[in-house]
Amino acid sequence: MVDLVAGLAAIKNGFQIAKSITELVKQPELDRSDLCDRVLLLQHLMLESQEALNSAQEEDRRLKEQIVANDRTREIEQDLDIQEDGHFYVRKSEKEKGFIPYCQACWGTEHKLVALIGTGKPGAFICPIHKVTHYTKAYEDYVNRQREGMRRANRPPGGSNSWMGS
């Protein structure tokens, strides 16, 4: 906004200098040195106003981009649902295709929609940035099945609780 005000002030001053040049030229004896000084000042003011207006235009473009980015952030935010089982976000618009888990921390701190990566174990996902793992009920069930399998594998033959058969 300051650049725009400065540009408009330079244009106003430029018009005053142009008016003074017109009056100077109408005088019977023309002072060429004074005329050259005023023309140079007018050129300087025109350049100053052009720079200020270009700067204001750039600021306007930047603000419009920020508005678009803010609108996009709001749009994504409205599309996010917290998945309590795992404590990550999913997008409502993607639920029909299955779901992609997104990191809560990445969205909460930087408004970056970062997809979590599967760990190779059912229901366990990791953030590629924070390295935080999110576990779901499916992962807990998987771990419990693994433990139960290990207990069964470690039991002695015949169902006895000891190797001696007591």
Image (cartoon, rainbow, N blue to C red):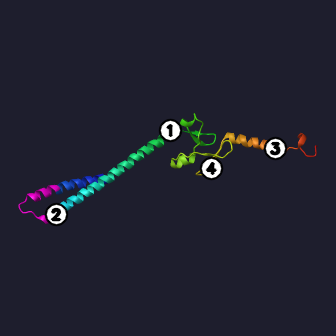
Give residue 21's position: percent from left, percent from top.
14, 58
For label 3, the crowd category at 10 Å Cα-Cα, with few meaning under 14, some 14 to 19 and many 20 or more, is few
Q: Is residue 134 left or right of residue 53?
A: right
Q: Is residue 97 above or below residue 32?
A: above
Does residue 33 appear in this view?
A: yes
Label 4 close to label 1 by CB (< 8 Å): no
Label of residue 78 in the image: 1
Look at label 3 and name its amino acid.
Arg
Residue carrying label 2: 36
Quadrant in the picture for the C terminus:
top right
Residue carrying label 4: 132
Gap in angstroms between the C-alphas marked 2 and 3: 100 Å
Gap in angstroms between the C-alphas marked 3 and 1: 46 Å
Give residue 115's position: percent from left, percent from top.
57, 45
Gap in angstroms between the C-alphas marked 4 and 1: 24 Å
Query: Residue shown at 21%/53% (left/top)?
Result: 12
N-terminal of the two: label 2 or label 1? 2
Query: Residue shown at 53%/36% (left/top)?
Result: 93
Residue carrying label 3: 151
Element type at mark 2? helix
Closer mark to the observer between disc 4 and disc 2: 2
N-terminal of the two: label 2 or label 3? 2
Question: What residue range appears in magenta?
Answer: 18-38
Query: Residue shown at 88%/44% (left/top)?
Result: 156
Look at label 4 and name its amino acid.
Val
Look at label 1 and name its amino acid.
Gln
Give residue 28's position: percent from left, percent from top.
5, 61
N-terminal of the two: label 3 or label 4? 4
